[in-house]
Image (cartoon, rainbow, N blue to C red):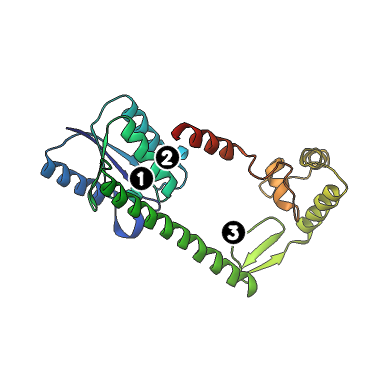
Amino acid sequence: MKALVYARYSTHKQDGGISIENQISRCKEYATFKDFQIIDVIQDLAMSGGVNRARQGFMELLTRVEQGECDIVLVYDLTRLSREMLSLLAVERFLSEYEVELHTVSDGTVETSSPESFMAFAVKALFSEAERRSAKARTKRAILHLKENGKAFTKERYGWTRIGDEFHEVPEEQKIILLVNQQYKAGNTLADIQRLLRKESIKTRNGTHWQPEQVKRLICCYEQTHKRGGNELGKTLRRFIQAIS
């Protein structure tokens, strides 16, 4: 049986010691044991598993599955594919449509041909999602603690300069922030404010012209004009739900 190996790590710390080399080596050992023929190894280096479309290797993997190149997708563990339960379930459904098996080295064969085996897969996906959400919650708590104690919790931003763990105002930039907020409160749009800054030859800290997204970050309590749930991801998820029902 032909297998495509997929390997990924998020940061240069390589996810707690699971290096890209180690993932590939373990997958090759598994393939030898199972008598699989590895036709290629696809990698995503220093890429988060949270944004699927940003991972060129992952998108290539899906394309090659569609083209019928393999019988097996082989990964070190499920988190290499994604840490999000929805993504893992979608990948499982996708592979099933093309009659491609998913195998993981650390978990053994992940197959969903029976209710029992699907339950095992779903539980692993659930634990992965739970850990992702726990990490997100820990990060939020850490940031809140830093904010409450007057410590820096982000990179240096416009209007402020960072000295150690504290931010100090930059008077000239604070004037620009005040101007932007006054314009916004007067009913001007981001595009209006952008044009005003350009007209007054007011540039960013990097010496470039302001973009609407950069202007928005200067505005206190900016209100989105689109309705909640009306974004493109929400529409895509609706199409996804309709397609798999």
Query: Which residue is label 3 attached to?
Result: 155
Image coordinates for residue 134, horizontal then vertical, percent: 46, 62
Say which label, 1 or 3, has the lower sequence index: 1
Q: Residues within 10 Å of mark 1 (few under 14, many from 20)?
A: many
- Measured in 3D between alpha carbons, the distance from the residue under mark 1 to the one under mark 3, in whole angstroms, is 29 Å
Image coordinates for residue 83, horizontal then vertical, percent: 40, 51
Residue depicted at x 75% and y 55%: 221
Mark drawn on residue 55:
2
Query: Which residue is label 1 attached to?
Result: 81
Image coordinates for residue 59, horizontal then vertical, percent: 40, 34
For the C terminus, the image quarter is top left
Front position in the image: 81 or 167:
81
Residue depicted at x 69% and y 61%: 160
- Proximity of marks 2 and 1: CB atoms separated by less than 8 Å: no
Q: Is residue 65 left or right of residue 242?
A: left
- Residue 233 image-quadrant placement: top right
Residue depicted at x 24% and y 52%: 107
Q: Secondary structure at mark 3?
A: loop
Q: Residues within 10 Å of mark 3 (few under 14, many from 20)?
A: few
Say which label, 2 or 1, has the lower sequence index: 2
Above/below status of 170 relative to 108:
below
- Residue 149 image-quadrant placement: bottom right
Q: Secondary structure at mark 2?
A: loop
